[in-house]
Amino acid sequence: MDRRKIEENFFKGMMVLSTLIVIASLLVVLIVLLFKGMPALNLSMLTQTPRGGYYLGKEGGILNAIVGSLYLACGATVIAFAISLPTALYLNEYAKRSKLTSFTRQSLDILWSVPSIIYGVFGYTIMIYLGMRASLLGGIIALTLLELPIMIRAMDEIIMTTPPKLKEASYALGATKLETTLNVIARQALPGILMAIMLALGRAIGDAASVLFTAGYTDNIPRSLFDPAASLPLAVFFQLGTPFPEVQQRAYASGAILLVIVLLLSIASRLLTKRAMKYVIR
Amino acid sequence: MFKPYLRIEKLNVYYDGHRALKDITVDIPEKRITAIIGPSGCGKSTLLKSLNRLIDLTEGVRVSGRVVVDGTNIFDNEVDVTNIRKRMGFISQTPNPLPMSIYENIAYGPRIHRAKDGKELDRRVERCLQAAGLWNEVKNRLKEPASKLSVGQQQRLCLARALAVEPEVLLCDEPTSALDPISARHIEGQLVNLKKDYTIVFVTHILRQARRLADYVVFLYLGELVEHGSAEGVFTGPTELKTQAYLKGEIS
Amino acid sequence: MNTRRLKDLVASKIMFSAAILSSLIVLITALALFYRSMPILKTQSLSDLLLSSSWHPWRGEFGFYPFIMGTLWVTALAMVLSIPISLLTSIYLAEYAPSKVRGIMKPMMDLLAGIPSVVYGLWGVLVVVPLIREYVAPLAGVISTGYTVLAGGIVLAIMVFPIIISVSEEVIRAVPRETREASMALGATKWQTVKHVVIRSSLPGIIAAIILGFGRAFGETMAVLMVVGNVPKAPSSLYDPAYPLPALIANNYGEMMSIPLYDSALLLAALILLLTVLLFSVAAEIILVRIKRRYSLG
């Protein structure tokens, strides 16, 4: 009896310790980055693009990267959404349980695990083939590929949980499949759909490997789809790699900005989803 | 006395090869309450759902026979099924409000059938909620989510929603079985009121309910139509042995 | 045909195309990479490429061995660090933790999973690398810059936590109450029930979670690149630098076109990466499908 208790307590202790390690890692990451990043953070960082000598420690900011990331991520999210929602709705409401639907779902699950650098490489290959240069458009395409599996899978999972009785109610009133899908199923799944969008958006803003080859980097804010675009993750990376401590400080600040953006997105996602739950049938 | 409204002719329904309804032939009278009774699993819901082709939604279903309304067989290929469903209101066993506000639940049906928003629609929503006996309880909170209503209120909401598309027939699949006795009585009262304007067909496994409400009775046993006729006739003097046994409670 | 039915029909065709498009992306990517790797595969055999240690692109020598080993070392270390901690945490969360703790953990896991990899890399450079250089390595009697396999392993382990924890926790909680009750009714303690019954039932799912985590660790690029040293030599200790495949690709894309066959070699590296991750993904998928089937029948 005693031995059982000892073993139980030992493992309980180990489990709590592990949980604490996990929580601690999160906190250490957040705290270090915010602490290190704050000193170098000032208004000009956020509102100016790099001036001459920025990379040597002089004036400027990373507005180019902030705006670039926004353009890239939002562009990709819009396109990915336009493809993802129809796909998820199709898989659940229009297609029968067939080899095609399971194949599609499996492919998407596989895609979900594909490292983002593959998307960058693939995008780059296509771009060379088409004679395109590193640009906003290239980055958007690579990011769209990255976001698609995340969005579709998340939307698919939530749409799958639509109670059949809701659909029955709509059909019984004489609605067509499209009307039922758009008015009832999509409404019921709205919180999940919003969450899917935010999730994919967050991933896209933070990804470096896929935009490394495809979006390029520049000190300017892109003015057309064919201009290269800077991005926050790459801003962190490049600034960190310089020998100047002032610029390295800026890397920390850029990292902190990126972190804060991701955190804000997470909070916004939670809030939006809660509001969207208003009409959902439990 | 009973003017036929819906004619069911040799209706057979197969689920994945299994024959759930066998050669059902019966006329449903107009503007009366018809009760479909019988033990559980005998095809009552299947029959009901055939009348508005809701069984089309189930996989592996095959139907043969005809259901004729106004001279048209609803199972004809040319027929627009959404139009059929508009003419047949349907209320299911467990209330199924749509994920919208109370107002939007009722407005949903008319809107998909091309009704325009505005005073006209507001009036229609009010009329239907009144007919379902729910208006007074919700008139000040039409914008609230329908999911916040109690189960009894939700079922009345579903009734109002079904009425909103201005059907000719009301099909009710055990409409009170999920409700408490008070709400159940409420619904029953509404149905009795409505029969002057609508043909009502309801499925029930509660004999006493059938006795209370029905003008016409259809008795199904194991997918077969055993007996049908006026409620008075069937309840006081059933001609078939199985009917007698069921009414006495020997089979259930 | 009236407008409503027409709209219905058109919409279903559009959705169908979207679905087909989505499902073909993997195939197209793999094919494109394969096609572009062909040139180098024509000049050297696959086994030469994979086993040779000499990486001198300007001499036309493309031995992938150091990079494959680098990837394996870092990934293996990350898994060794991450698996025990993640599993213990998931068991705790699924079986023992009060609901308040579970409530806090879910957003925390989401946060951990959402932090971009450059940010992890930055943190690694700020915290882990100096830690190893100043404290850990001297303790082990080694001189090191800190940019080591160990650094990569630690950072990766943290990145993998949320994946293993969230999937494992779900699988463990999915074990039916009746199973646990059966064990407790026989007089077993909670821990015995967990150890002998619950974990055994959820083992396939846990393995799937681990495989998914492995796949993520294998393909992770930026964070590892920033802390691992990027020296093209197969590591022989935890304190050696390494050069994993994704880092190889990321670092050299700029020179790809200038040296003959370089681009083809890098794309081959990408193909190897893709195929490995694919393999792991499919394996995890098969296991998870089998579990879902088992529990929906039972």
Image: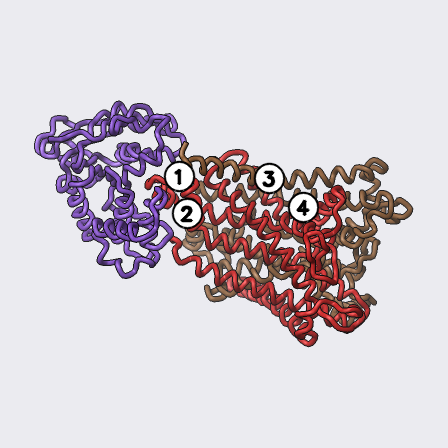
Residue pictured at 50% horizontal, 40% vertical = A91
The vertical placement of A201 against C267, above or below, is below
Q: Which chain does the brown colour mark?
A: C
Height in image: A215 above or below B191? below
Query: Residue A188 appears at what percent x and percent y?
Result: 42, 51
Q: How far apart are marks 2 and 4 (CA)?
A: 39 Å
| Chain letter belonging to callout 3 | C
In depth, the one of C273 and A262 nearer the eye is A262
Question: Where is mark 4, residue-wise?
Answer: C277
The spot of residue A83 in percent (x, y) is: 56, 45
The chain ID associated with circle 2 is: A
Badge 1 density bin: few <14, some 14–19, many ≥20, Cα 10 Å: many
| Residue annotated with mark 2 | A183
Q: How crowded is mark 3: few (under 14 residues within 10 Å), some or many (20 or more)?
A: some
Front-lying residue, C213 or A224: A224
In space, the residues marked 3 and 1 are separated at their CA atoms by 25 Å
